[in-house]
């Protein structure tokens, strides 16, 4: 799929855990889609761990791709927990996944590619009814919206089981795993990192889409957008 217009209308960006580089990968994918001439919007259904007035993940994405990038944050919560747990601590009711799916579907209808960055892993609960990012993808597909997922993985040990389970959960819901991206590739990879280049595609059944170098999130906009297409091998 060398042309980003061949991507699904909605791409779920999930991870093997927290702090694996989802936000920087989301920004890099947005820069890639833009560089290939398509319109892209980034959505964060639920942002946790951010106090009112502080910058969140979508602010970081715009800081890397450009302030003109269209972004939508649907829910913001202050505690650094799963959306369900953070909402419970704040005493607020989260919108059900069906409401998120309706909004994402509306956004996707007005652009070429919509990147949806999840909170943590695929099965982290994002509403008070046990709904997850995977359920959001299922709801979108039920509405006729083409949807796939990208898995952002850490570079070293301890990632293969979670990656395999994520792939199985996506397959069970009929959501294609489009590719795996290593979110923070070290300048001097060790044995585990090198083996993961082979093992991640093997255990997930999905191609290795790319490696985003460690420190990429500190690049200025122009340098980031120029370099991002070279981090991927989407074909």
Image: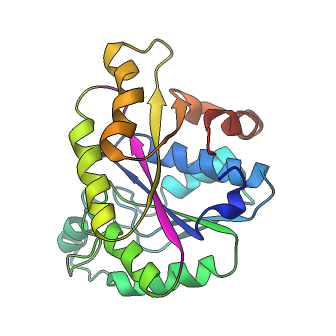
Q: Position of residue 91 (x, y in %)?
A: 21, 78
Q: Between 112 and 41, which is closer to the camera in this rendering?
A: 112
> For the view shown, which residue lies furthest in the right direction?
37
Q: Position of residue 52 (x, y in %)?
A: 43, 64
Is residue 60 depicted above or below 93 in this figure?
above
* Quarter occupied by residue 69: bottom right
Residue at x-position 53% and y-position 44%: 25
> Per the image, is 141 magenta?
no
* Quarter occupied by residue 50: bottom left
Q: Is residue 176 visible?
A: yes
Q: Is residue 121 visible?
A: no
Q: Quadrant of the C terminus?
A: top right
Q: Between 210 and 30, which is closer to the camera in this rendering?
A: 210
- Total numbered labels placed on residues in the image: 0
Position of residue 19 in the picture relative to residue 92 (left or right): right
Residue at x-position 74% and y-position 65%: 39
Which stretch did the figure color magenta? Answer: 145-156
Q: Position of residue 113 (x, y in %)?
A: 64, 66
Residue at x-position 52% and y-position 32%: 211
> Per the image, is 146 magenta?
yes
Position of residue 191 in the picture relative to residue 188 (left or right): left
């Amino acid at each position: 799929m060398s042309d980003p217009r061949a991507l699904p209308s909605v791409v779920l960006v999930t991870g093997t855990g927290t702090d694996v580089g989802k936000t920087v990968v989301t920004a890099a994918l947005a820069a890639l889609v833009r560089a290939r001439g398509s319109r892209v919007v980034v959505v964060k259904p639920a942002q946790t761990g951010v106090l009112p007035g502080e910058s969140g993940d979508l602010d970081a994405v715009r800081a890397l791709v450009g302030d003109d990038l269209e972004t939508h944050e649907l829910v913001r919560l202050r505690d650094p927990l799963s959306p369900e747990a953070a909402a419970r601590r704040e005493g607020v009711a989260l919108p059900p996944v069906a409401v998120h799916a309706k909004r994402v579907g509306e956004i996707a209808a007005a652009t070429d590619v919509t990147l949806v960055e999840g909170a943590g892993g695929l099965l982290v609960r994002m509403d008070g009814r046990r709904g997850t990012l995977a359920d959001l993808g299922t709801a979108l597909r039920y509405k006729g919206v083409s949807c796939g997922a990208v898995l952002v993985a850490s570079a070293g040990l301890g990632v293969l089981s979670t990656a395999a389970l994520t792939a199985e959960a996506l397959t069970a819901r009929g959501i294609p795993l489009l590719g795996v991206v290593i979110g923070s590739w070290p300048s001097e990879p060790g044995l585990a990192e090198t083996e993961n280049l082979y093992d991640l595609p093997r255990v997930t059944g999905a191609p290795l889409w790319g490696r985003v170098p460690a420190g990429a999130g500190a690049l200025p906009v122009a340098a980031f957008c120029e370099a991002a297409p070279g981090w991927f091998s989407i074909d």
